[in-house]
Structures are given as C-alpha cells and as structure tokens.
Amino acid sequence: MKLSNKILFLFTLMVAATSLSASQNQTEWYSATGSPAVRVFVKGAYVYAQLDQGGLNDSAIKLKHVNGDLLHEYGADYIRIRDFNADGSFDIGVLTGAGYGGSDMCYAVFEYLPDFYAYKTRSSKTVCFN
C-alpha cells in the first residue's frame, strides 16, 4: 500500500472515530418541564447539578465521580432526570452499571429536597430498570 493511501486510510478512520464519539458523549442534560428546573452536566471528572433559581443562587453542586466508560458507552442514558421516589419532584439518576446489552440499567439516585430547594449530595438509593 502506498504511503498516500495509508495516510488517507488513517485519516478516514480518525474522522469516523471522532464522529462516533461525538454522538455518544453527551455531557449536558436538562429537565423537560416540571419542578425543579435543573441542568445536569459533566465537567472534568465529576457530574454536577445546577438548579435554575432565577439567578439568585445558581451555583452547581458536585454529585458523583464520572464513570468515563459508562458515559462513553451509554451517552444520553448516563443521566436520568425523573421522579424516582414519587414525591412530585425531579430527582437525578447517575448510571452506575448495566447488564449485558444495556439491560437492567442501575442508577445512583440523588433526591430533590423541596424544603431546601436543593439535591442531596449523597445518593440515597440505587434503582435498576430496563
């Protein structure tokens, strides 16, 4: 194989790998509608949650260390924003493991505390579903 063909081949592989990883590595999630309005994001080695408090105190809190392998593999499913404890408020789930082929995905749940307008900084339970 000529040198120019080898370079073209390697370039093609790099472009394909870049577009694949860009589509799988989601790093921000938002609550749809409901309470509370929250932005969850990955920055550095951690997952953070930031409540929309109308600019009063929009500081982010650190929730959990990122599992880079799970983030890369499951992308958008790495974070779940939903009412895990049926109290009417959005909680945050961070993927901690998954069965073969993505079945039985397990999440560390960070519950919303409406009286404090904040999230627990430690996971209160693990929930698994598929």
Image (tube, grey):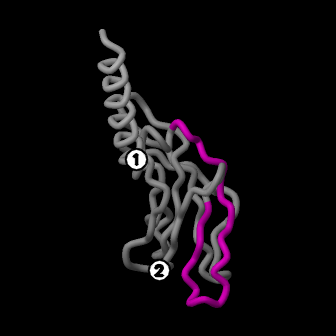
Residue 95 x %, y %: 51, 47
Q: Residue at x 44, y 65 (%)?
A: 82
Residue underneath mark 2: 35
Q: Quadrant of the C terminus?
A: top left
Residue 13 x %, y %: 35, 28
Which numbered disc, 2 or 1, marks the residue closer to the eye? 1
Of all residues shown, which one is farthest toward the top? 1
Q: Quadrant of the N terminus?
A: top left
Asked where in the image residue 2 lies, by quadrant, the reply is: top left
Q: Residues within 10 Å of mark 2 (few under 14, many from 20)?
A: some
Q: Position of residue 53 (x, y in %)?
A: 58, 86
Magenta-tinted stretch:
48-69
Question: Residue at 38% across / 73% down in the picture?
Answer: 32
- Whether tag 2 and tag 1 are in contact, CB under 8 A, the answer is no
Mark closest to the chain's N terminus, 2 or 1: 1
In the displayed structure image, the side of residue 106 where residue 122 appears, left or right? right
Measured from the top left, where is residue 93 in percent x and y?
52, 56
107 or 50: nearer the eye? 50
Crowding at dot 1, Cα within 10 Å, few <14 / some 14-19 / many 20+, comes out as: few
Magenta residue check for 43: no
Is 33 rendered above or below residue 66? Answer: below
Q: Which residue is mark 1?
A: 22
Secondary-structure class at tag 2: loop
Report how far apart the C-alphas of labels 2 and 1 lie in the structure.
Answer: 30 Å
The three-letter amino acid code for the residue at tag 1 is Ala
Q: Is residue 64 magenta?
A: yes
In the image, is 129 to the left or to the right of 92?
Answer: left
In the rendered view, tell whether residue 41 sits above or below residue 97. Answer: below
